Amino acid sequence: MNYDVVVGLEIHAELNTKTKMFSGAPYHFKAEANTDTNEIDIALPGTLPCVNHEAVKKAIELCHALELKIDPLVRFDRKNYYYSDLPKGYQITQQFHPIGRDGHLYIDLDGVRKDIRINRIHMEEDTAKQFHLYDETLIDFNRAGVPLVEIVSEPDMQSGQEAALYVEKLKQTLNYLDVSDARMEEGSMRCDVNISLKPQGSTVFGTKVEIKNLNSIANIKDAIEYEIKRQSEVLDNGGTIDQETRRFDEKTMTTVTMRKKEGNVDYKFFPEPNIFPIRIQDEEIQSIIKAMPELPDAKQKRYIEEYGLSDYDAKQLLLNKNLAFYFDEMMRYSKNAKACCNWLVSELQGLLQKNGQTIETTKVEPKSLSKLVDMVNDQTISSKQAKDVLVDMLDGNDPEKIVEEKGMKQVSDTSMIEKLVDEVLDENPNSIIDYKNGKDRALGFLVGQVMKKSKGQANPQMTSAMVKEKLSKR
Amino acid sequence: MEVNEVKELAKMLMFELTDKEANEIIEEFKTFDKQLALLDKIDTEGVEEMVYPFDVETAYLRDDVPDHVLSQDEVLANAAKTKQGHIVVPKVVK
Amino acid sequence: MNIDELMVLDIKDRANEAYKKIHEVNDKLNAVITFIDDDGKRKEGKLAGIPVALKDNISTKGIRTTAASDILDNYIPVYDAAIVTKLKEAGAKFVAKASMDELAMGGTNRTANIGPCLNPYDDTRITGGSSGGSAALVAAGIVPLAIGSDTGDSVRKPAAYCGIVGVKPSYGRISRYGIIPYASSLDHVGYFTTNVKDAALALEVLAGRDDKDMTSSFAPVENYSEILNSDVKDKKILVFGNVYDALNDEVIKDRFDKVVEGLKERGATIKVVHFDDDLMKCLFPTYFIIANAEATANHSNLDGVRFGHRVDGTSMEEIMTNTRTRGFSSFIKKRFVIGSYSLFEENQERLLKKAQRVRRLIVEEVLKELKEADGLLAPAAGTIAPKLDNTSTDELSDEYLIGENHMVIGNFAGLPSITLPMGYKDEMPIGINLTCNAFKEADMFDIAQAIENITGCKDMIKEVA
């Protein structure tokens, strides 16, 4: 039988603020255990929460980017449960009034734009980190209280691929906005999948299975694909799907049962009495939105429509936000978009990779790379020369200076080249005969001779054209 | 309400009750129910819950600037068991 | 001695008597959980060298803070409550962490894990609670100022039973940061003194915006002790008719009448008001549901993992369960079960939300009148301090539901409220309560001082040693 697959995602992303959601303690990933907490984070008796302004701003930015309706009255609630990683015995979250509702994220599904609806985004706080040893668990409270946003999608995805694209796109958005590092491998972005199958065309939803704690986009895709296969087989054999929570086992590439659901847990949600409702003025929301960096979709559109880049090139630039920002910076100094893109994506990136550097660490300034591109473009130097210059630029040197110092400037002076061409032709009568007899190689030889005489500085295109012209006259 | 049910309620709150305590709670619930009847008499149709003493909104939010942090010693000072800078509990099974 | 009298002494000597006498007095009253030794340091300020007692739910860095609960019997905070910092800056000298009902969840001070606190006037009677230890230490003349907390009437009831002044200012007036909570939406920091002027001075020290408490108010703090003025000529004062009617004690009513008469003579306008009786009967159940619901969540951090008296077990759940089973008294456990019951999703509509809606109706009902007046006056309690072994309260009578619980209105609506002595019955003090409009503490102190002048009940001390 064929089934319709229904997938929804719940994604937690840590906001990259300097302090916690409700305390002024700093947070650094990989800090020594229990050195990034204060009395609020470990819930010592008598402590009270105090909301981080920056966290609210970042949540608003994300809501706007994903087209959610923003609730300007920020309110918090308590979610009650006992667990060793939850210091207060409740988590402060936004159950009743999430900061944003009803948004969209668009994925590019083989060239077709698909709308994945977002149900809600709310702010909450992270739990402590636990390390499970053989017979004991060690708890580090540094992560306790780190601001989180939870992004809850509607069940609008139908395959592992769509889910992967959704997560990819969300990660990209979080990155561009500087809202979250969104590194799944470091746990600053975490994904839970809800998946159910129903007979094709049926309007009745199947039993929902939750897959928890997926830590890479590849795993999300693989887990969903496995789960589709598993559930299809169960249903094909007349079985029923248990409502349960599963986890993905990377070694076997399968999902395994974590726990069966026995009714819904009652978290006894109620409004947080220690935080009065916080009114965010409309002017503030507008100014937050105004200060937001350009989003990937808008950038892509601009690159294609304004700069005439290909879809492929535009996407290459967008893969890494710092690459895109670098490119934007280059375009302040150069008009040669296509060439800038090529030199940045292929040449510079390739060179950096070889040297164990990245676009984030390189000393090559966007302005310098633009200069180099323009020098090639106006034929001051050849591409080949430019590649050598780029190597020297890695130390942060200015390309013009390098060209100057190395005497690399191409000779584009017509009379100078003409003189050299005449000399070479005079010296090589046999080659002229060869050329006239249809031996193309002779042309290359003659051009090479001119280049040699110019010590490599003659403009090769000009030289080649001049040689041809002169040959036709002899 | 039965003794077992009351004990179950307590378990969810991470403590145990003796039979005596459970029976006392059952008794208290009887008084409580009578007091609830007084609440039931009040028409609260369309009344919004009062969560705070005043209907106030605040505009204050904390600047994202680290203020103070406890030393690791202070964090662990009141913990019953610690190891390598961590607080220790028996192995937690997820 | 009150604060003014102590201030006459050399700064070095102001706390000497307190440090010296407190042990002996405590042998009689059982009012102290932890003694604080004199560190010999003195500092200038509004309370320079003045001995002060702190209720044991106030976080004190390096000084054990138990909230009178076994679960915290070994807990030593690593931070100071906001008010502790303020008091230190004002030069106050702490002499003790005072007894209280366990986790402040009581009104008798009988539920302290160290046993009941005894009334200085009669050691067979309670002090009232939950801030009973603080009240006893002021009433016995050990300290002229003691800090408490007030969720229902936990400062203002013991003040009545112990013959002293008890103040609970507006919600948000004093930072709650570092106060081990009972119910966050009702909790207020309060305090005891022996006269109104000291009470006005104390608020100057304690009040003020604190960024660590998001419910803390930005309302400017006035120089209450300097602007204090007992003139009530233009004041309009309401008499709480429902409370008066619900009480049966003729002596208390008579003393109360005399105060009202005195206010009239001083030119105040008096109006007797009767609020909707059905709403007033709901004061207690409304309070009970909200307070216990918030309390069970507030105390979920008491799990033995990071602090507190851990009882071992073979799993995380077992540790938490063993710790909490040993750590809480039966009384507390029962409250938590009821509080949690009100929070269940299927019960919230009928219990917590219903109570929160009724809370609004009660507040609206009272403010409708109070907004047009300056204060609301009622006897603080229907009786003198009950006997330690008294258990005969009829929890469905008007006398209990209204007469003994009317002061929760101040907590529901965050209103400033003060109890002060108005005389004696059977050699036991009796108190009167005045509640004013939010952030009108200056009005409250003015009217209170007029009452103090009328009754002559000022600096009432009962020496026990």
Image (cartoon, helix red, strand yellow):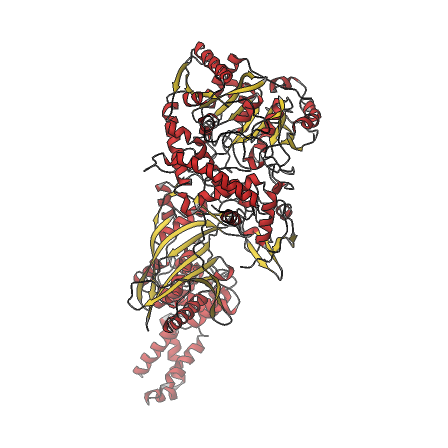
Of B36 and C116, the residue lying toward us: B36
Occupied quadrant, residue A285: top left
Occupied quadrant, residue A245: bottom left
Give the quadrant of the N terminus of chain A. bottom left
Of C139 and C276, the residue lying toward us: C276
**Residue at figure coordinates x 39%, y 50% from the top left:** A61
Residue A12 visible in rendering = yes
Percent of width and height locating residue B14:
55, 49
**Does C111 sit left or right of A160 as displayed?**
right
Percent of width and height locating residue A430:
38, 89
In the image, residue C63 sits, relative to residue A54, either above or below, namely: above
Percent of width and height locating residue A199:
32, 68
In the image, residue C74 sits, relative to residue A205, either above or below, namely: above
Occupied quadrant, residue B41: top left
Give the quadrant of the C terminus of chain A. bottom left
Residue A340 visible in rendering = no
Of C171 and A354, the residue lying toward us: C171
In the image, residue A62 sits, relative to residue C220, either above or below, namely: below
**Does C161 sit left or right of A184 as displayed?**
right
